[in-house]
Image (cartoon, helix red, strand yellow):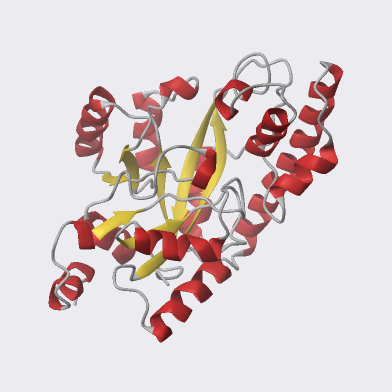
Amino acid sequence: MSEAEALRAAGLDTVEAMRIDLHAHTTASDGTYDPAELVPMAEAAGLAVVAITDHDGVAGWSEARRALRYGQDAGVWSSIRHVVPGVEISCKINGVGLHMLGYMFDPEDVALDTALAEIRVSRTHRAEAMVAKARELGAPITWERVREIAGDGVVGRPHVATALVEAGVVDSIDAAFGPDWIGEGGRARVEKLDMDPFRAIELVQAAGGVTVMAHPLAWRRGPVVTDQDIEDFAKAGLTGIEMNHPDHGPKERDHIRGLANDLGLLTTGSSDWHGSRKSTPLGAETTAPEVYEELVARATGTQPF
């Protein structure tokens, strides 16, 4: 029985009951809520499925799985049925940064685990270097405080941005990500190690997972890849492309839809939720049930929790 059929059999055949969000972050990277909190928040948002896709690591998987099972055993969940294990991989091609979402791969795959660990180490070194640059520019922030903000998660620019806001250097996270500080071309910006996107696709695929390119036309964030790049990714084994995303307007969504049809890619929808660090609520954008089912069917590394 498919996921959609199972939901209908349980009497949950409304659009709301079958809502699926495949891109969410927790404190395992740069979100503001613990992995265990993701599950009840997905329940509150009326989601049937939510994916945990922290940056460059899988540290939040086990906690999210325990929270889901605890609630199922206690009979407290009426909406949330599955958590999809995933990751958002930092990539770069021709000087353009991009993100690849990997889903349902074997977390113990040595090659992928090693590659992700290298990026996490680079993230930490970069954040420390950005703090040093910001201090040289007069910002009264410290590396110790940035580490406190990150907690056990992978240290990233949002944690540095939060420290800048706390210190009164800027008024908002968005301002911190501007050219004056740690945004594209910013005075305190430092580059980090990014994975080649073709290698990301290959590693996730070899680990039994599927890949979806995240927010491909989010041009407000900076330069974006070309249609030819996306075509090349598809030829290399890319499974899907994120179409419905807060950073995509109608024009971008129409373009992605046409591109996906031409290339045979699945189209997903996701909120890219970061908790209170961003204003977009969990479940703001969703994936069609039939697309989710196809992603699950193609994955062999692991299954949704």
Residue drawn at the location 66% of the way across and 21% of the way down: 170
Asked whether residue 23 appears in the rendered view, the answer is yes
Residue 246 lies left or right of residue 114; in this view the side is: left
Residue drawn at the location 58% of the way across and 47% of the way down: 55
Residue 52 lies left or right of residue 145; in this view the side is: left
Image quarter where the C terminus lies is bottom left
Residue 139 lies left or right of residue 164; in this view the side is: right
Asked whether residue 199 appears in the rendered view, the answer is no
Q: Residue furthest bottom?
A: 73
The number of numbered badges drawn on the structure is 0
Quarter location, residue 19: bottom left
Front-lying residue, 210 or 132: 132
Residue 167 in the image, given as x and y percentages of width and height: 75, 29
Relative to 255, say whether 233 is above or below.
Answer: below
Quarter location, residue 277: top right
Relative to 176, say whether 204 is above or below.
Answer: below
Quarter location, residue 128: top right
Front-lying residue, 210 or 164: 164
Residue 246 in the image, given as x and y percentages of width and height: 36, 34
Residue 301 in the image, given as x and y percentages of width and height: 46, 68
Residue 54 in the image, given as x and y percentages of width and height: 55, 51
Residue 97 lies left or right of residue 22; in this view the side is: right
Image quarter where the N terminus lies is bottom left
Residue drawn at the location 29% of the way across and 60% of the way down: 46
Relative to 200, say whether 205 is above or below.
Answer: below
Residue drawn at the location 44% of the way across and 37% of the way down: 279
